[in-house]
Image (cartoon, rainbow, N blue to C red):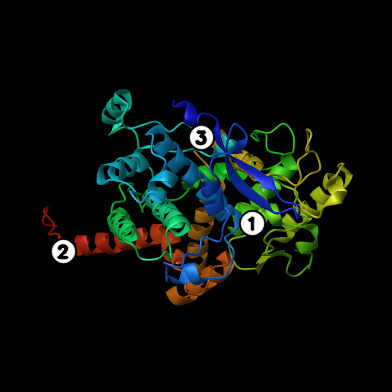
């Protein structure tokens, strides 16, 4: 590894107001002032006219965190190849087609894992060993998703545009400036074409007929999450872990909703127990390094009477007697170690669900439970005789999606595949002649 790219990490800091923000650092110091200025700016550009660019809403923390890992990938790649993007843009030379193509290839084959903030190395494509490894593992090692690939290309395009604005935008027209503008426009045309093509180049094929979680494994999961189950994989915190899993399974909410859930959000109505799913970005009471976030609209989420009883039991017997828990209103807390009593972390919930998955023999993560909820919701809604339009409206409300959201079609792939298979099978049975003649 190039010494210039050693110890490059994404670190999360809090400002004086308690707001979290990511910084890309090397040996503990910001690795590039321009890179971090772009990362934590508002990402608006006088060159862009899209609706998203005109929005006055600040970029959310979790979006900036995602950008941070994309930018770290970008920074490592170009530094490994001895390319200083700031200098290139400042002097008006930008990138050659070969250099852009090398970056495009790197974006397809290298995954920069952010789990637990452990950073994986990004190595140069000019290294013969790496080229050989790519060739040897081309069919066995999966490429990154089309979305990840597309986002990495977009990050390069936007960052180069940011640097261009910093150094050249609105400057007096000179021969040198005309040449620089011409080089910049050529770069934008080339990278924009690559981005456009990347949307059509999704090599990851998902079997739409496959259920998010097979029925037999799902019933196993419902057993192992129970506090009193002999198959429960945990030695401690069983009640908390059961409730967290139960909320994700029963409601289909995101992890962020569980992390943000506060005691004051619980509505203990005997006839309709529920909790309020709020949107409070940059909550000053959230002391977590990675604060909780709810991506969906604020709404009321109904839960069963039994689940509400378990939540109240947990609050009264575990949460209320834990040190530090009185300092905040979040329901779920860390139950041991130095962070005891503090709000539970995102990684902790990921680990809980992953451990349940390991017990039943599948790779399980919280969002998979959201997909499974949608499958079950579709079945139940059809049983009640709701129309397709009514089901979509109900799903949008339950998921907290906007009215114009297209997410329903994503979660409905399984049901669509089943319906198509049933229709196809019936047509085939009617059209194929009976070869036995009876």
- Considering only order in the chain, which callout, 2 or 1, is on the residue closer to the N terminus? 1
Labels 2 and 3 touching (C-beta < 8 A): no
Q: Is residue 19 left or right of residue 152?
A: right
Give the residue number, with chain letter if any, for mark 2. Answer: 431
Using the image, determine if residue 103 lies above or below residue 158.
Answer: above
Which one is in front in this view, the residue at disc 1 or the one at disc 3?
Answer: 1
Residue 95: image location, x then y, percent: 32, 46
Q: Residues within 10 Å of mark 1 (few under 14, many from 20)?
A: many
Does residue 387 appear in the picture of this structure? no
x and y percent of residue 132 in the render?
Answer: 27, 25
Which of the pair 217/436 is nearer the observer? Answer: 217
- Mark 2 or 3, closer to the camera: 3
Q: CA distance from mark 1 to mark 3?
A: 30 Å
Q: Which mark is residue 361?
A: 3
Which quarter of the figure is the N terminus placed in? top left
Between discs 1 and 3, the one toward the N terminus: 1
Q: Residues within 10 Å of mark 2 (few under 14, many from 20)?
A: few
Kindly identify the residue that appears in the image at 78 percent across and 55 percent down.
285
Using the image as rendered, state which of residue 385 and residue 388 is in the foreground. Answer: 388
Residue 53, percent across and down? 48, 67
Residue 419, by quadrant, is bottom left
């Amino acid at each position: 590894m190039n010494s210039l790219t050693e110890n490059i990490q994404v670190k999360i800091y809090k400002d004086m107001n308690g707001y979290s923000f990511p910084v890309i650092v090397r040996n503990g110091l910001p690795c590039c002032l321009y890179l971090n200025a772009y990362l934590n700016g508002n990402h608006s550009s006088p060159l862009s006219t899209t609706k998203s660019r005109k929005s006055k809403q600040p970029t959310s923390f979790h979006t900036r965190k995602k950008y941070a890992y994309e930018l770290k990938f970008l920074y490592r790649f170009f530094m490994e190849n001895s390319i200083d993007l700031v200098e290139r843009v400042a002097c008006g030379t930008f990138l050659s087609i070969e250099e852009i193509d090398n970056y495009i290839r790197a974006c397809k084959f290298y995954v920069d894992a952010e789990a637990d903030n452990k950073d994986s190395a990004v190595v140069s494509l000019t290294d013969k060993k790496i080229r050989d490894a790519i060739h040897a593992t081309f069919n066995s090692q999966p490429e990154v998703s089309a979305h990840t690939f597309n986002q990495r290309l977009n990050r390069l395009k936007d960052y180069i545009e940011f640097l261009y604005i910093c150094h050249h935008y609105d400057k007096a027209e000179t021969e040198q400036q005309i040449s620089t503008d011409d080089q910049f426009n050529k770069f934008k045309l080339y990278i924009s074409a690559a981005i456009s093509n990347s949307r059509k180049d999704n090599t990851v094929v998902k079997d739409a007929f496959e259920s998010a979680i097979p029925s037999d494994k799902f019933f196993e999961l419902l057993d192992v999450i129970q506090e009193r189950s002999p198959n429960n994989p945990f030695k401690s915190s069983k009640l908390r872990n059961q409730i967290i899993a139960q909320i994700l399974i029963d409601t289909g909410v995101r992890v962020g909703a569980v992390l943000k859930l506060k005691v004051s959000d619980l509505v203990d109505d005997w006839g309709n127990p529920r909790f309020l799913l709020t949107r409070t970005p940059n909550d000053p009471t959230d002391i977590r390094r990675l604060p909780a976030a709810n991506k969906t609209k604020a709404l009321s989420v109904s839960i069963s009477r039994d689940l509400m009883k378990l939540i109240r039991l947990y609050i009264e017997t575990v949460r209320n007697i834990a040190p530090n828990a009185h300092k905040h209103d979040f329901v779920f807390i860390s139950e041991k170690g130095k962070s005891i009593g503090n709000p539970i972390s995102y990684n902790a919930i990921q680990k809980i669900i992953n451990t349940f998955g390991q017990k039943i023999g599948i790779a399980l993560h919280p969002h998979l439970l959201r997909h499974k909820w949608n499958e079950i919701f579709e079945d139940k809604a059809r049983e009640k005789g709701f129309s397709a339009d009514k089901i979509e409206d109900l799903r949008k409300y339950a998921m907290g999606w906007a009215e114009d959201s297209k997410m329903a079609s994503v979660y409905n792939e399984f049901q669509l595949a089943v319906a198509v298979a049933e229709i196809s099978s019936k047509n085939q049975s009617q059209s194929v002649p009976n070869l036995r003649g009876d």
